[in-house]
Amino acid sequence: MIPFFNIDERIEAASDKALETCSEQFKIIDKITEFNQLKVQKAFIKYGISESHFVSSTGYGYGDRGRETLDKVWADVFGAEDALVRHNFMCGTHTLTVALFGVLRPGDNMLCVTGTPYDTIHGVIGINGEGMGSLKDFGVNYSEVPLKDEKPDINSIKNAVNEKTTMVYIQRSRGYELRPSLTVEDIAEIVNAVKEKNSDAIVMVDNCYGEFTQTKEPCEVGADLIAGSLIKNAGGGIARTGGYIAGRHDLVEKCAYRLSTPGLGKEVGATLGMNRELYMGLFYAPHTVGEALKSAVYISALFESFGYDTTPKYNAVRGDIVQSLGLENEESLVAFCQGIQSGSPIDSYLTPEPWDMPGYDSKVVMAAGAFTLGSSIELSADAPIREPFYAWIQGGLNFHSSKICALLAAQQMLEKGLLKGIE
Ligand SMILES: *Cc1c(COP(=O)(O)O)cnc(C)c1O
């Protein structure tokens, strides 16, 4: 059936079945994609985007129409008053850092209500020591409310929020955990609980991996500030770097003062010819996220059919693009990642091996064959080599490309005598 790659007939048969299993889910994803595509398209039309918005600015970048209008289009799409979309954000962590430092002041109280946040944010908050210039070093207090049964614990959140709470922080994506992602409905519930206790508390959402997975975004249900990376969902696989912050106008302005300088804010920043790809990335983002969601759903269905634990299940409601697979042992994790890598459009000839990655307490094996280094809207898989031996998979610019990578991963496991569920 597939002339370019050698896939065992039994895996192909399982794949055909998995596709049937996914068909309802694919229809739901198509509807979400269409809704979000039209939302984006409407915003482009509203602001009359033309080639003149792609003109490159240099130096201070004063009066860059493309940059200024992109912020407006972005705000429109994300249901926000204002936005700050810049290639100058180096990664998601940098973007979140600018947002946190932009808004929080000494003596303020930050409360994370989705358990301990994503690893790279620990240093920003000062969870793991002082001295690097973390929020803690600047006198910002931090506390958190753990999840309960893997869900936000609304009662404990209500108990933890008081008149001293400056910011409530929410992480939408599961990141590298096994808990479910938050849906926009979950976020709405948190916002309502928080505002009931303290209507001035700023609700900020780490929106990484969440954009366009549903038809609403967090600001539409009352979040005050969101931030995310452009080498994930919102860059559509086109943006080569960057990040965005969106939300209430006064807060976005403070973030702009932090990114550039107090006083200059959004007025500066040469775009160096980046505008076109940031617009095009946003234009592609709903479709690309749809492809990534289909990839995740298919991989979940296929590996569940082999007998592996998958989370989320293929038919779960998703608030992010991340898929985890319980592959049960080190050999399977490595074979899986090697199979994914072997089918990647870029760097297919590399063989991932487990290594001691800085910042991790166990070895990690990673597969990534991407046009943009570290892009995780492109298909990638990573797995810490430790119990419970899960691989985290995200992205896929293109469903058919992800599908063959998944089949090659299964094939690699089969050839090493590791694949379950095949007689
Ligand atoms: C990716 C991610 C980040 C950090 O982004 P980087 O680009 O890796 O710095 C933060 N939070 C979540 C939930 C993420 O998925």
Image (cartoon, rainbow, N blue to C red):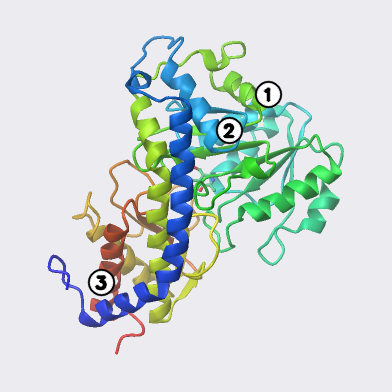
What quarter of the picture does the C terminus occupy?
bottom left
Where does label 2 land, which residue? 246
Q: Amino acid at mark 2?
A: Ala
Badge 2: residue crowd in 10 Å (few <14, some 14–19, many ≥20): many
Q: Which residue is mark 3?
A: 412
Quadrant in the picture for residue 141: top right
Q: In the picture, residue 415 is in which quadrant? A: bottom left
**Given the current orientation, which residue lies at the most extreme bottom position?**
423
At mark 2, the secondary structure is strand
Type of amino acid at the residue the image marks with label 1: Asp
Where residue 115 appears, as percent x and y from the top left, is: 67, 54
> Residue at point 74% right, 53% down?
145
Q: CA distance from mark 2 to mark 1?
A: 11 Å
Q: Which residue is mark 1?
A: 250
Separation (CA) of disc 2 from disc 3: 43 Å
Mark whose residue sits in front, 2 or 3 = 2
Q: Is residue 145 visible?
A: yes
